[in-house]
């Protein structure tokens, strides 16, 4: 005669609840992971700030150790991001030039890279401030397509 071994398993209700919980946890993890790929949209004057960048009209000139920025447009420039190149290296520095629309600013700057290396090429990018769509915070956006070479 065979002995019957008392084998217990999960009840179907508990197994279903565990499967549903596992699916929900995986869905939340995928949502949090994918949220990093979608950036917040920044607006200025009710339009995406990328469209406003195309209307930024500014000139930049270097006079000795001074940098003069003339804003010919009607969009205020919050600051300048200056990218310096030397050989195969590059660095970006933020310069606090606030240039209102139709105004000009001239300030002394030191355009040197780490180790006091003089850059071979310098590109100046305007940075604008806009509102995060659907929120009350502001975000700075650098117009990479509107750069000027010194």
Image: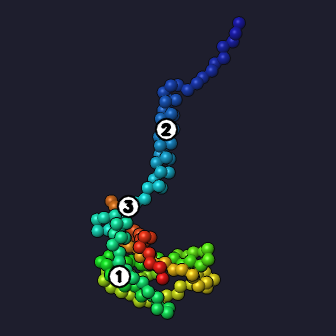
On the question of residue 65 being in view, the answer is: yes
Q: Nearer the viewer, residue 108 or 86?
A: 86
Marks 2 and 1, how far apart in space? 55 Å
Residue bearing the label numbered 1: 71
Element under disc 1: strand
**Category of crowding for the residue at label 2, using alpha-carbon neighbours closer than 10 angstroms: few (below 14), some (14–19), many (at least 20):** few
Element under disc 3: loop
Q: Give above or below for 123 relative to 31.
A: below
On the question of residue 93 being in view, the answer is: no
Q: Residue at x 46, y 48 (%)?
A: 31
In the rendering, which numbered label is found on residue 23?
A: 2
Q: What colour scheme does the image use?
A: rainbow
Q: Nearer the viewer, residue 98 or 29?
A: 98
Q: Give above or below for 114 relative to 45.
A: below
Instruction: Locate the N terminus by quadrant.
Output: top right
Whichever of labels 3 and 2 marks the residue nearer the N terminus, that label is: 2
In the rendering, which numbered label is found on residue 107?
A: none
Question: Residue 91 location in percent, x, y?
Answer: 56, 76
Marks 3 and 2, how far apart in space? 30 Å
The quadrant in which residue 71 appears is bottom left
Task: Determine contact: label 3, label 2, CB under 8 Å.
Answer: no
Of the two numbered discs 1 and 3 in the rendering, the one whose residue sits closer to the viewer:
1
Question: Residue 92 location in percent, x, y?
Answer: 52, 75
In the rendering, which numbered label is found on residue 41?
A: 3
Question: Residue 150 location in percent, x, y?
Answer: 48, 82
| Left or right of residue 148: residue 118 | right
Q: Nearer the viewer, residue 27 or 13?
A: 27
Q: Residue at x 40, y 60 (%)?
A: 40
| Left or right of residue 81: residue 58 | left
């Amino acid at each position: 005669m065979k002995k019957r071994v008392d084998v217990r398993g999960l009840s179907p209700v508990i197994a279903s609840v565990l499967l549903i919980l596992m699916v929900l946890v995986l869905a939340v993890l995928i949502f949090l992971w994918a949220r990093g790929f979608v950036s917040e949209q920044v607006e200025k004057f009710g339009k995406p700030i990328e469209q406003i960048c195309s209307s930024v009209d500014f000139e930049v000139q270097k006079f000795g150790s001074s940098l003069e920025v003339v804003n010919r447009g009607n969009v205020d420039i919050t600051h300048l991001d200056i990218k310096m190149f030397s050989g195969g290296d590059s660095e970006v520095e933020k310069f606090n030039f606030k240039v209102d629309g139709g105004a000009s600013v001239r300030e002394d700057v030191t355009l040197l890279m780490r180790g006091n290396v003089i850059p071979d090429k310098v590109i100046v990018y305007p940075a604008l401030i806009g509102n995060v769509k659907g929120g009350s915070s502001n975000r700075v956006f650098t117009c990479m397509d509107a750069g000027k070479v010194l």
